Amino acid sequence: MLTKTFINTKIFQTSTFRLAAIYLLVFAVSAGSLLGYVYYTTVGLLERQTEDTIHAEIMGLADQYKLLGLAGLLDSINRRSSESNGEIYLLVGPDGKRVVGNLATMPPEITEDQIWSDFQISVGKEPNVVQHTARGFQVQLANEYELLVGRDVQELRQFRDLIREALAWAVGMSLVLGLGGGYMMSRNFLRRVDGISDATQTIMEGNLSGRMPVTGANDELDRLARSLNTMLSQIERLMTGMKEVTSNVAHDLRTPLTRMRARVEAALRQENKAEYKQALDQTIEECDQLLRTFNALLSIAQAEAGQMRQGLQALDLHEILIDVVELYQPLVEEAGGTLTLGESPPMRIRGDRQLIAQVLNNLIDNAMKYGETTEGQGAIIDVRGSTSDNMAVIEVADHGRGIASDDRERVLGRFVRLDQSRTKPGNGLGLSLVASVMTLHSGSLQLEDNNPGLRAVLRLPLLD
Ligand SMILES: Nc1ncnc2c1ncn2[C@@H]1O[C@H](COP(=O)(O)OP(=O)(O)O)[C@@H](O)[C@H]1O
Ligand SMILES: [Mg+2]
């Protein structure tokens, strides 16, 4: 007996099982009608043929009786039963005794009110007598004579039983296989859906690294699981990024705020007006720095959220390059360095003008701060644009100390500043912004060695 532990009742509620059950029903009905037709055209046909023969014979004998009377009938029966080959004839008189025929007595199964009946006959010689089933037609003649004509239908009945058994097996097997198959299929399906629900549960409990199970069967459930996993990875990345930013922000803002507070406190203890003024000036400067940090963070957040993507317009990078270089040239030269813009072709891209300009500002600003060959000499900065492989390529190169290859990935993180750069102003957000703006534009930022110095290479897809 199957108990609850073996049969999971949830299975019967799955769509797979319902589908399987519907298919099974349709299949059972069509198989049933097909088999019924086969039965009707084989067994049914043979039985009808037998009855037709018996009926024809009865009619023949009745004609004999009408034409030739009892004597003629006796003669006919005698003749026919002597060459008997499975045919059965019996004529009994009003006293119930046999008058003529190849049966000893009227079989007990035959009653007067029934014309067609099945009865048992003994076949063969002693001691090999066996019982066969026969089918007969019985009529009342005048003078209370009774005539029975029949056929041995033993073989026909065996054939009928065989066919019936085969039909029953066919129907039974298809039911069992169909139900079993449906059950197995649904169980498999259910197991996988359960896997996905379990994974969802784990994730909802806070384990963001949980993923949907992928079986490798490459079916629609696997595809679903894969897309969900891609989505989860994206969410996890964003969440981790957000956590990092929050703690970084908290950490990095505490230092300047503490410093500011200490300075204001110290100024309050002073009587001197000039020192007041100096403290306030420094405070304003520090506030500006904080505002810059916040603005940079906001820009990064916006670029990363990708909301600006709809706002991207067609623009020429070359024009932005000229503007930015023009803006920075006096500053660089004032510091004793040079900023040159090499030959560059028109480069039409889809982008946000302000963000792209910000990116170039950040790179040139870095080159100015960290690209000096000798301290206080100013930096030699080369900017150039080109196109290759349907990409606009912009390079900003300096000849300073560069970034060691191990650090090139790290400096893209938020608030990351290399130790030797701490003497220069900055918040460590410049390259982060460059990287997120590049992602927003489906482009890339690559930091390379300029031997010596750093070469920042931007690649952006060209408009065709
Ligand atoms: N051109 C460069 N040459 C050498 N080091 C650089 C250069 N650009 C950036 N870096 C290093 O990468 C760090 C991160 O740069 P960035 O994100 O722009 O922050 P910030 O300029 O505020 O320090 C810098 O602190 C510096 O250590
Ligand atoms: Mg910078």
Image: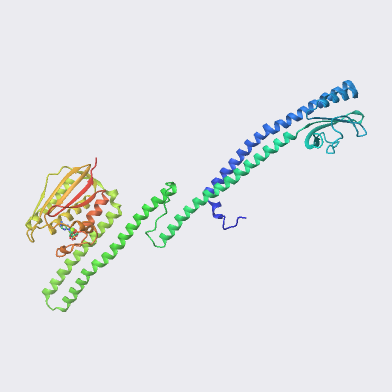
Q: Position of residue 362 (x, y in %)?
A: 18, 56
Q: Residue at x 65, y 39 (%)?
A: 166
Return the residue nearer the eye: 386 or 68.
68
Q: Is residue 91 above or below residue 196?
A: above
Instruction: Please identify the quarter of the rendering in which residue 430 is found.
Output: bottom left
Return the residue nearer the eye: 62 or 125.
125
Quadrant of picture, ligand 2: bottom left
Q: Residue at x 21, y 47 (%)?
A: 459
Is residue 15 visible to us here?
no
Q: Position of residue 23 (x, y in %)?
A: 56, 43
Is residue 222 visible to us here?
yes
Return the residue nearer the eye: 72 or 273.
72
**Quarter of the image where the C terminus is located:** top left
Q: How is the image coloured?
A: rainbow
Q: Position of residue 385 (x, y in %)?
A: 16, 46
From the viewer's perspective, tell me whether residue 93 is left or right of residue 437: right
Q: Position of residue 289 (x, y in %)?
A: 19, 64
